[in-house]
Image: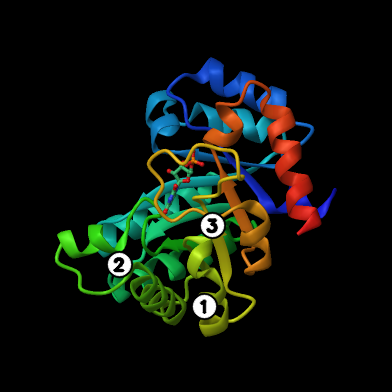
Amino acid sequence: MTEGIEKLIVAIDTDDFDKAKELIDKLEDSVDIFKVGLEQYVATRGKTVDYLKEKGKKIFLDLKFHDIPNTMKSAVKAAVRDNVWLMTIHVSDMEGMKQCAQIAKEEAERLNIEKPLIVGVTVLTSLSNEDLQDIGCNMTTEELAIKRAKLAKEAGIDGVVCSAKEVDKIVKECGEDFVTVCPGIRPETSEVGDQKRVVTPADAIKKGAHYLVVGRPITKSEDPKKSALDIVREIENA
Ligand SMILES: O=c1ccn([C@@H]2O[C@H](COP(=O)(O)O)[C@@H](O)[C@H]2O)c(=O)[nH]1
């Protein structure tokens, strides 16, 4: 497998199981990791997860758990049983994050399976400094993302979701082994859409991102396979 494929995660954001299946089938030779997010999971009641398992693909379950500690930890426990490779929670209170990290370890040990990676969402890539001001936060997106990454690390979480704009600073603060997953990736010619902190695939890799999450630039393309392969090549040449 090429290094580019190992770093690319494709977000299957559609509310239709047949469309998701068609995309996965088109991309299966060029993509190894697929992200199942809220829209797809709720619409199909998790059916895509089963389909990806049948295909032997790595699954990133992006349901961004955020609740009281007991509910978060119970959701993480259930997701561990689904044998996903990576899952998201929100970087929230220390107690909730610590309990998620602990239960994932215990449940994976009990089932004798590899523990899924748990990453915490720092600051959504669709948010700008002004958006944070609007909700009463006087930090910049970068300051808040770094602060939350440090909290996630302290709580025992494996890594974070962040924009590649701040990924170099997070790697510097939290270390090379702390997993960084970066959405908001846009090749030069792609539409930005609702993303506000965007970076090209090449720049994200140069700044130290471990994994790049790409949705619409691939899934809405006329030729999703070509678009995925172009990104894989850009990653490899970076
Ligand atoms: O901060 C975040 C966290 C998650 N996402 C998710 O990534 C993909 C990005 O899709 P695009 O179509 O490439 O914009 C999407 O599923 C989001 O839910 C994010 O964008 N930002």
Name the residue located 37 percent from the left edge and 69 percent from the top edge.
97
Q: Which label belongs to residue 92?
A: 2
Mark 3 is on which residue type?
Cys
Please tell me in which quadrant of the rendered image residue 88 appears.
bottom left
* Image quadrant in which you'd find residue 19: top right
Which image quarter holds the C terminus?
bottom right
Disc 2/disc 1 C-alpha distance (Å) = 20 Å
**Residue at image coords 36%, 76%:** 143
Residue found farthest to the top = 18
Q: Earlier in the sequence, mark 2 or mark 1?
A: 2
| Residue 205 vs residue 34, the one in the foreground | 205
Of badges 2 and 1, the one in the foreground is 1
Residue type (three-letter) at the residue carrying disc 1: Lys
Disc 1 crowd, CA 10 A, few/some/many (<14, 14-19, 20+):
some
Residue 17 in the image: state x and y as whole percent. Answer: 51, 20
Image side of residue 227 versus residue 183, left or right: right
Say which element carries label 1.
Answer: helix
Q: Amino acid at mark 2?
A: Ser
Q: Is residue 106 visible?
A: no
Question: Mark 3 falls on what kind of element?
Answer: strand
The Cα–Cα distance between marks 2 and 3, rounded to whole angstroms, is 19 Å
Q: Nearer the viewer, mark 2 or mark 3?
A: 3
Which residue lies at the image location 35% right of the left edge and 53% below the top edge?
65
Q: Is residue 103 left or right of residue 48?
A: left
Q: Secondary structure at mark 2?
A: loop
On the rendered structure, is 106 left or right of 201? left
Q: Which mark is residue 169?
A: 1
Q: Which mark is residue 182?
A: 3
Q: Position of residue 43 (x, y in %)?
A: 39, 25
* Viewer-closest of 100 and 232: 232
Q: Earlier in the sequence, mark 2 or mark 3?
A: 2
